[in-house]
Image: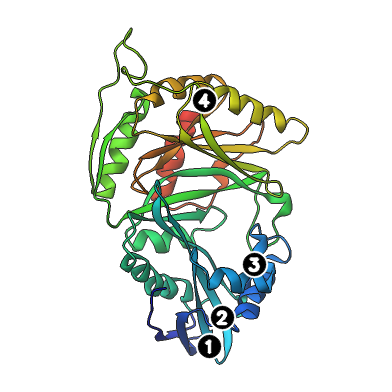
Amino acid sequence: MEEFESREVELASHEDGARRVFLMRPFAPGDEQGIAGCVAEEYGESYFKRDFYDIDKIREDATGPHYRFFVAETEGEIAGMEIFQIYRDDEEDYIEPASQIIHKRYRGYGLAGALVDYTLPLAERMRPCALFVHAVTFHKVTQIICGEYGMTPTGFRLGSFLTERMVNSYQKEACEKYSEGIMIKAVEKKDAGTIFLPAEIAAFADKIYRRLGVGYAIAPVPSAGQPAADGEEISDEAEITVKTDAMQRIAIVRVIRDGRNLARKMRELIDSFAQETGWVIQLLLSISTPAVYRQYEELKEMGFFFAGLKPLCGVSERMYMQWIGGVSLHMEKYALTEAFDEIRRDIEHFMGED
């Protein structure tokens, strides 16, 4: 496991100017209780990552290969924490700085930004293809801080949080479900290669890849009568992974291998949710293969729509398609930066709500 140095910073309260020293450091055994306390103090029992209520599980994750935990400590108390989730396999190679929570007692010091300034360079030092962030949309803090660090909005994971289950400090407005904004920063992968996109998405993708500052080429769309996969053989059987969160009513589907029966599999998944309202599906398709032309049209016919890109996060470039059923998102109520509000308007166009 990598060795990371600690950093001590002195911060001033925006409210009364009082100054306090915070030690930002990697996890050490004994921090588990303080981390769980930050979660419970902010979210009660409603936090969607249920492992954060289990002291033994926090310790296991913090010392295992798939996470890195960091804390901010002041006068012997855990004032905040941030976690990296590490995705490294044959297909994916990225780090997600996730689950930053600041104890209410220590808000107003700028600690969230200080933690990002401390931790994100450590993530880059681990040399992933990219950094990836899910930024909540019921406040702007993460969006602002990560934007200042150089991360680019690329899309949304829609309907992540069921507001009837939310217990936190933020306004719920009229939203039945809140979403997450997706932000990316290129680290080691500086060229996306050739990407295959339906014509209606090309301008959006061109804008995003230019903002990311990496190389890319958008393949010409096949002309009428040309095979949808441009001669590439597609398997009959799609290979997918499905991760469901029954508490928040969201399913995350990742296509591992393209297949002609993908649309049928998605219809079966939608039908499995018929007895309970509020379910949404986020689907990740490869755009590094021309099979996407066929799949995009089939999925659109079922009510899926384009929701953004997941660039530079591994071997394949990917795009998001989203099914939201009858959920009313009211995205105009989200707390968004100007950069994310532009992406919201783009996505609402694909939803047919512009």
Can you tell which of label 3 and label 2 is closer to the viewer? 3
Report which residue position mark 4 lands on: 237
Helix, strand, or loop for circle 3?
helix
The amino acid sitting under disc 4 is: Glu
State the CA–CA distance, disc 3 to disc 4: 37 Å
State the CA–CA distance, disc 1 to disc 3: 21 Å
Residue 212: x percent and y percent? Answer: 28, 49
- In the figure, is residue 243 to the left or right of 232? right
The 10 Å Cα crowd at callout 2, few under 14, some 14 to 19, many 20 or more, is many
From what the image shows, is residue 275 above or below residue 294?
Answer: below
**Residue 326 bears which disc, if any?**
none
Q: Earlier in the sequence, mark 1 or mark 3?
A: 3
- In the figure, is residue 190 to the left or right of 98? left
Report which residue position mark 3 lands on: 52
Report which residue position mark 2 lands on: 79
Residue shown at the point (45%, 81%) measured from the top left: 25
Report which residue position mark 1 lands on: 74
From what the image shows, is residue 77 above or below residue 207?
Answer: below
The amino acid sitting under disc 2 is: Ala
Helix, strand, or loop for circle 4?
loop
Q: Quadrant of residue 49?
A: bottom right
Helix, strand, or loop for circle 1?
strand
Residue 175 visible in the displayed image:
no
